Image: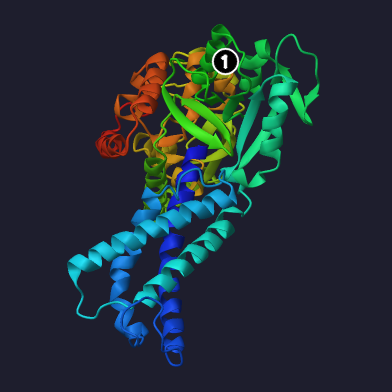
């Protein structure tokens, strides 16, 4: 999910750049207006007297300048690998982009031929000031500490000689949003720590380390790994949906999608078996926020009536909070309207032998723990509505694999663990394909099918298909 945070940063920077460009335009115009009162010699050869420049007679140019500058910044690579670029290289990129913008603007002005020709000194001054203000704003944005949700746990593989330089690079750049979770050493090397970072195990122990640690990315240092070892590590990561990165010299691995990244001089290839279109994932998050906010407001009467009905039936709590496994197995409390008796969890053990669902999940068509109100809200899926709050908080999405109970995850087969590599959701392919009428293995395969074929259009299609499935109560228990 680090790509999502990077895309969020890019869109945030575009908004900041828009504000900075417009503000710099206004500031430059006002300065040029005041300077023109006592400076009467033009900088650029031409008419000897400065033309009268005011904010009002130059304001029409902002309609061209803002989009031209943003386009040039995009084409000039000013939004690529933001946190991992040195300040001097970042400034050079901005200078190049501003130079390109000036040339493009002059070409447009030659074609458009505005009634009032722009001041050449104003354009030169604005271009210079915009390069500086964009750089300062970018430094301020990129140097802020990464938030908790932006931090990605990275596991580094390599010997002491090979891993230490890369670890040192990561340690001195906390603004990258990367936390080193530990190191995996070769089987034939003895070490309890490398570069001040704890060794979590040997290469042969990698699968068990990935099972127990919330790792989001694995990075393999060095250039002497044999193909079998590389494939073993890549397969272990691919099974769990963890991003696998290594030195760019290693090519030819057959995993889902490859992406070239740069860690301040460390060129790496990342291989991911989960969606990598970061911009689309940002839009997905915006859809989640808007959709959840609208649902929470519009469904308030339903919430109140449901809460009243549950309270009147047995006087117990209205909501039921249950620990679930989210993205990469991170635990969170998922909320539902309580549809069972108060001591339902304590009575679950005595009903295990009556489980009607294959696999580690528990489902019963006539569960004796379900209350009268509970049967109704389960049939209509009203019991799931409080999860819009989980969506709003970012723990869930509108569309995604359903969040499992941690006790169920422990019983998963390894290939099934990859469903945890995408944020869980309210609905998915399983919900519109019969829900509890579908066996557990097919359910898992449907979730992986969703991850492998994910797109915004697929999300919209599933949301539309969920409505009749809920209204008809298809497969609900």
The residue lying furthest to the top in this view is: 228
Q: Quadrant of residue 25?
A: bottom left
Residue 368 can be seen, yes or no: no
Question: Is 161 in front, or is 208?
Answer: 161
Residue to which mark 1 is pinned: 233
Report if residue 93 is visible in the image. Answer: yes
Q: How is the image coloured?
A: rainbow
For the C terminus, the quadrant is: top left
Towards the viewer: 375 or 314? 375
Could you tell me which residue is drawn at 42 percent across and 16 percent down? Answer: 440
User: Callout 1 environment at 10 Å: few (<14), some (14 to 19), or many (20+)?
Assistant: some
Total numbered labels? 1
SS at badge 1: helix
- The percent coordinates of residue 355 (x first, y second) are 48, 16
| Residue at left offset 57%, top offset 39% | 333
Q: Is residue 247 above or below residue 3?
A: above
Q: Is residue 108 above or below residue 472?
A: below
Using the rendered view, name the quadrant where residue 185 is placed.
Answer: top right
Q: Position of residue 455 (x, y in %)?
A: 32, 35
In the figure, residue 63 lies in which quadrant?
bottom left
Instruction: Give the farthest residue toward the bottom.
Output: 37
Nearest to the observer: residue 395 or residue 19: 19
């Amino acid at each position: 999910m680090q790509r999502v945070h990077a895309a969020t940063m890019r869109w945030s920077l575009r908004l900041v750049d828009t504000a900075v460009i417009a503000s710099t335009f206004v500031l430059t115009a006002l300065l040029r207006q005041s300077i023109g009162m006592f400076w009467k010699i033009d900088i650029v050869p031409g008419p000897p007297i400065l033309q009268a420049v005011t904010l009002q007679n130059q304001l029409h140019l902002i309609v061209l300048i803002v989009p031209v500058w943003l386009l040039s910044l995009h084409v000039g690579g000013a939004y690529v690998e933001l946190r991992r670029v040195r300040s001097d290289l970042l400034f050079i990129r901005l200078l190049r982009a501003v130079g390109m913008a000036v040339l493009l603007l002059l070409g447009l002005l030659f074609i458009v031929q505005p009634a009032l020709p722009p001041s050449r000194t104003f354009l030169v001054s604005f271009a210079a000031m915009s390069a500086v203000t964009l750089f300062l704003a970018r430094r301020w944005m990129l140097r802020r500490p990464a938030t908790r949700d932006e931090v990605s746990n990275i596991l580094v593989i390599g010997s002491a000689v090979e891993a230490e330089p890369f670890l040192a690079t990561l340690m001195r750049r906390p603004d990258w949003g990367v936390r080193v979770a530990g190191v995996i050493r070769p089987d034939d090397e003895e070490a309890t720590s490398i570069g001040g970072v704890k060794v979590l195990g040997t290469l042969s122990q990698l699968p068990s380390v990935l099972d127990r640690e919330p790792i989001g990315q694995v990075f393999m240092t060095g250039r002497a790994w044999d193909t079998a070892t590389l494939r073993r590590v890549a397969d272990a990561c691919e099974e769990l949906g963890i991003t696998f990165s290594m030195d760019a010299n290693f090519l030819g691995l057959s995993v889902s999608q490859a992406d070239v990244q740069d860690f301040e001089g460390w060129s790496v290839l990342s291989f991911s078996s989960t969606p990598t279109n970061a911009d689309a994932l940002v839009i997905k998050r915006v859809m989640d926020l808007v959709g959840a906010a609208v649902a929470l407001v519009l469904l308030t009467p339903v919430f109140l009536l449901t809460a009243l009905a549950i309270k009147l039936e047995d006087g117990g709590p209205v909501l039921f909070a249950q620990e679930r496994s989210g993205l990469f197995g991170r635990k969170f409390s998922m909320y539902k309207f309580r549809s069972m008796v108060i001591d339902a969890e304590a009575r679950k053990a005595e009903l295990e032998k009556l489980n009607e669902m294959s696999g580690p999940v528990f489902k019963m068509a006539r569960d004796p723990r379900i209350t009268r109100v509970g049967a109704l809200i389960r049939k209509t899926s009203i019991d799931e509505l409080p999860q819009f709050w989980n969506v709003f908080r970012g723990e869930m999405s509108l569309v995604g694999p359903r969040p499992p109970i941690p006790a169920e995850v422990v019983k998963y087969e390894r290939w099934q663990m990859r469903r945890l590599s995408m944020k869980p959701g309210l609905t998915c392919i399983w919900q519109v394909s019969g829900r509890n009428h579908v066996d557990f293995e097919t359910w898992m395969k449907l979730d992986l099918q969703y991850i492998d074929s994910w797109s915004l259009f697929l999300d919209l299609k599933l949301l539309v298909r969920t409505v009749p499935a809920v209204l008809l109560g298809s497969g609900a228990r």
